[in-house]
Image (spheres, rainbow, N blue to C red):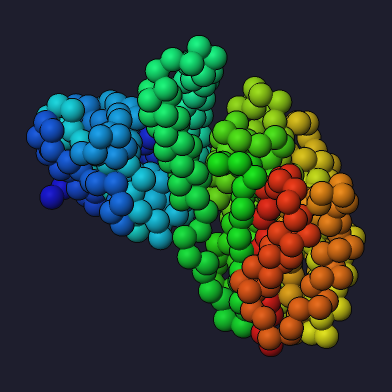
Amino acid sequence: MTTEPSINLSDIPLFHSLPTEEIARLQETFEVQEVSSANILFNEGEVSDAFYVILKGEVEIIKALGSPEESILGVRQAGEYIGEMGLLNQDGVRTASARARTNARVLVAHYASFTELLSRQPQLAYQLARVLSTRMTAAQNETIETLRDKNARLQQAYDELKAAQEQIIQKEKLERELQLAREIQYSILPGQLPGMGGYDFGALMIPARAVGGDFYGIFPLDEERMVLVVGDVTDKGVPAAIFMAQTHALLRASATVQLSTSQVLERVNDYLMEMNDKGLFVTVVYGVLEKASGEFVYTRAGHELPLIVDAKRQASYVKMGGGMALGLWPEPMLAESRVLIPPGGMLILYSDGVTDCTNTDEKTFEAAGLAEFVQTLPAELDAQQTCKAIYDQLVVFQGEAPQFDDVTLLAVRRLT
């Protein structure tokens, strides 16, 4: 069904900047759907294939629809859009449900068609990222305030030794909310690692708390190049998770063939400077793997040194490149570097939770310990097994000491 003549897409904020001919094309290709009040547009857990622009009426965003924990995360009005998370992770599933609060009319934009639009009008990606970051910040800030209030009431209950059963119920609810925050954070990460001929990828992230500030990304830039990124936000817990989500979204939106790795990080830094009112910052190593040559072109913004392992399992750190963390200075010094992954060799990127792992004797694992351990691993281990072996060694090294920091590992093995 084509759009009704009475609908002027140029009045919708998302499409304000589009030229007349692009608006005309949208009028012909996008669909309009009428939704009665209380009807469901999509359900949490469904595989996503489209997002919706609200033309008329109101739509509720709901978590845990139909369960005792059901909660309304927000109400979207005419001119706003919903379901856009799938544009960043099209292998993922819906993280919430959408239900018409009133009779509504929505524009159905399938991801495939909208991706073609983004290729023609890339400025829309930054607008999407801005709105997504604003929504996530507002939602997470509300969660923080809720958690603070509940913690205060729980503490008072414990001090007065009253309502013991209510204390248990509130504690369990808090744990469910933290688990929900953890699930949301993990939904941002790749559900399944992509493939590229001649290479094997592996990754893991273990937060020190229910949610953390580390993240990683593996996604194709085109058929011959794969983007690899590992980041580490200062601090831990919910505030770091918010900043992590913002950075991850901006990196995905900024990754293009036309920009160098340094230019991508400079653009992300500009956006972080606009929205960073908490004084947080993030270290990042962001690079592009060239399929044919095995060359990894990267920029390191205050992050840990990449580790290269050759076919004989000899490990060495790439002491090239460097730069300032993102989110602190308007013009951080960033330099692009290159390193070759040798045939049969491996590249390992990681966060400082690996090298700063501390045992009961207050000794740290350190970069030297990582390199020495990797050299003892069997050559036949694939990238994912290598990440798991490193983490298992950290657990052994740590012993009874608590996990000090988030642990993130990303490994790439060049097969030939």
Q: Quadrant of residue 79?
A: top left
Q: Front-most of 66 and 197?
A: 66
- The structure residue drawn at horizontal position 30% and vertical position 34%, both measured from the top left corner, is 69
- The structure residue drawn at horizontal position 82% and vertical position 70%, both measured from the top left corner, is 373
The count of marks equals 0
* Residue sitting farthest toward the left: 36
User: Quick check: 342 above or below 326?
Assistant: below
Q: Position of residue 272 (x, y in %)?
A: 64, 33
- The structure residue drawn at horizontal position 41% and vertical position 51%, both measured from the top left corner, is 87
**Seen in the image, is 170 located left or right of residue 295?**
left
Q: Quadrant of the C terminus?
A: bottom right
User: Quick check: 382 above or below 407?
Assistant: below
Q: Front-most of 70 and 251?
A: 70
- The structure residue drawn at horizontal position 17% and vertical position 41%, both measured from the top left corner, is 40
**Seen in the image, is 336 located left or right of residue 391?**
right
**Seen in the image, is 273 located left or right of residue 302?**
left
User: Quick check: 347 above or below 24?
Assistant: below
Q: Position of residue 194 (x, y in %)?
A: 52, 69
Q: Position of residue 402 (x, y in %)?
A: 71, 46
Q: Front-most of 69 and 44?
A: 69
Q: Front-most of 227 and 407?
A: 407
User: Quick check: 273 above or below 126?
Assistant: above
Q: Is residue 244 visible?
A: no
Q: Quadrant of residue 77?
A: top left
